[in-house]
Amino acid sequence: MARLSTVNLCKSFGGLSAVLDFSMEIGDGELIGLIGPNGAGKTTVFNLITGVYRPDSGSIIFNGQNITGKKPYYICKQGIARTFQNIRLFNGLSVIDNLKISFHKDVPYQLVSAILRLPSFYRGESWIEERAIQYLEIMNLADKREELASSLPYGEQRRLEIARALATNPSLLILDEPAAGMNPLETQELTNLIRKLKDNFNLTILLIEHDMALVMELCERIYVLDYGRAIAQGTPEEIRNNPRVIEAYLGEEVG
């Protein structure tokens, strides 16, 4: 059974088709890339999967369950987490508080315990603190735990956002241009980190990325979108040599 399947997804905005009949299947443990020129509909696909948008038609199946049109909080509870093209941290909160928020859906105490400050509340808060520090250590951010998120360098903000997504305990992690704005050294470190996280957390990963070197190095299979339609899928080598893909990126027919 596939971890995630999308079947003939369609989404239009004001009569303009952003995604048209898009179908994709991702197996358990795969690392899949979704690429295409600017405006091809990649982030719209992510927003459909994660419940930000409701598709006009088509279906989304996750772990055998139809999650089409469900709310983002519901989809997160089912095991899908994401990052964003533009980093969306709580800049006014500390690094560790950004991470603690991710444990909200699994908080190990009831509302009454929090109001009355019962022992279960303090045990739960201690559990959250310990877990948050563990994730920060994995991301090499533990020494920054009390700093404001907004004070972190760009690359560390990216790592914090990924850590926050991981803290929701997903089985599918969706990364929207995780290397955007990074220099070559940071990009290589990110590539190594994604591999490490995939193996250590037993993740299935779907990513959008414009850095083709990263995509070709990381991804097992790649889907290519152009004007909202899937024009190709295959291994990195097959995609690299696909005439339709080359035409979409270069804007001209290839020999």
Image (tube, rainbow, N blue to C red):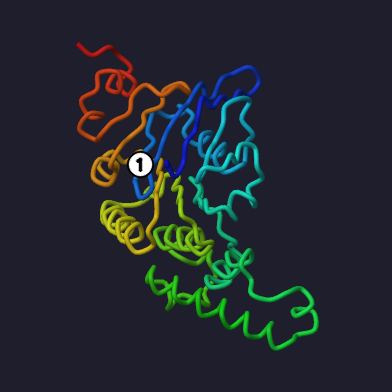
Residue 23 image position (x, y, % from top left): 46, 28
Residue displayed at 45% across by 58% down? 162
Q: Secondary structure at mark 1?
A: strand
* Residue holding disc 1: 32
Residue displayed at 54% across by 68% down? 99
Q: Is residue 224 above or below residue 15?
A: below
Please state which of residues 41 and 73 is positioned toward the viewer in this rendering: 73
Outermost bottom residue = 119
Question: How many numbered marks, from 0 up?
Answer: 1
Residue 38 image position (x, y, % from top left): 43, 29
Q: Is residue 140 left or right of residue 78?
A: left
Q: Is residue 253 left or right of residue 146?
A: left
Q: Is residue 88 above or below residue 129?
A: above
The amino acid type of the residue labelled 1 equals Ile
Question: Which quarter of the figure is the C terminus placed in?
Answer: top left
Question: Label 1: few (<14), some or many (≥20) within 10 Å?
Answer: many
Question: Which image quadrant for residue 239?
Answer: top left
Residue 59 image position (x, y, % from top left): 56, 31
Question: Which quarter of the figure is the N terminus placed in?
Answer: top left
Please state which of residues 109 and 88 is positioned toward the viewer in this rendering: 109
Q: Is residue 78 above or below residue 11?
A: below
Question: Which image quadrant for residue 155?
Answer: bottom left
Residue displayed at 75% across by 79% down? 114
Residue 35 image position (x, y, % from top left): 37, 33
Residue displayed at 53% across by 77% down? 146
